[in-house]
Image (cartoon, grey):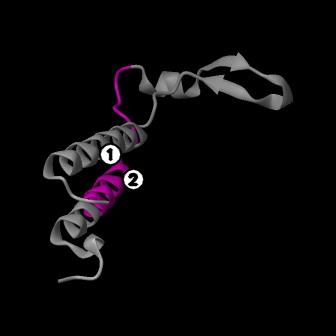
Amino acid sequence: MRLFELLSFQHIMLYLFPALIFIVVFALFLGFSHFRGKDSEKQVHEIIERFPDGIEGRNAPFPMAMTLTIAGTLVWGFLYIWFTGILGVKI
């Protein structure tokens, strides 16, 4: 019998695999920040807004690494809550 329920195999897997997957995905996206299309270079350099203090706004694409990291975090959180509820594990 363990003293703490957080030492179970399921919790270790829930902590280990998302961390390893995040490391791999983050390493891949260091080289590829967004999908490149026909107008990607034009969008990155074209200034569409000018704000005070010299701040310039561009229509650059949102980085894919950030999109997938946010989406993965939301999916993992939802599935963690879902499976914890189904399996009845005490947190």
**Residue 25 versus residue 91: which sits nearer the camera?**
91
Residue at position x 20%, y 72% from top?
8
**Residue 85 versus residue 20: which sits nearer the camera?**
85
Please tell me whether residue 51 is drawn above or below residue 9 in the rendered image. Answer: above
**Left or right of 77 in this view: 84:** left
Please tell me whether residue 58 is drawn above or below residue 81 in the rendered image. Answer: above
Residue 40 found in image quarter: top left
Q: Looking at the image, is mark 1 or mark 2 nearer the viewer?
A: 1
Residue at position x 17%, y 65% from top?
10
**Left or right of 43 in this view: 33:** left
Q: Can you identify the residue that label 1 sits on?
A: 77
Q: Quadrant of the N terminus?
A: bottom left
Residue 30: mark: 2
* Identity, as a three-letter code, of the amino acid under mark 1: Gly
* Identity, as a three-letter code, of the amino acid under mark 2: Leu
Instruction: Provide the residue span drawn in magenta.
Output: 18-38
**Residue 39 location in percent, x, y?**
42, 20
Please tell me whether residue 63 is drawn above or below residue 49 in the rendered image. Answer: below
**Residue 77 versus residue 31: which sits nearer the camera?**
77
Residue 77 found in image quarter: top left
Gap in angstroms between the C-alphas marked 1 and 2: 24 Å
Q: Quadrant of the C terminus?
A: bottom left
Q: Is residue 73 magenta?
A: no
Residue at position x 51%, y 27% from top?
60
SS at circle 2: loop
**Residue 11 location in percent, x, y?**
24, 65
SS at circle 1: helix
Please tell me whether residue 41 is drawn above or below residue 8 in the rendered image. Answer: above
**Residue 29 location in percent, x, y?**
35, 49
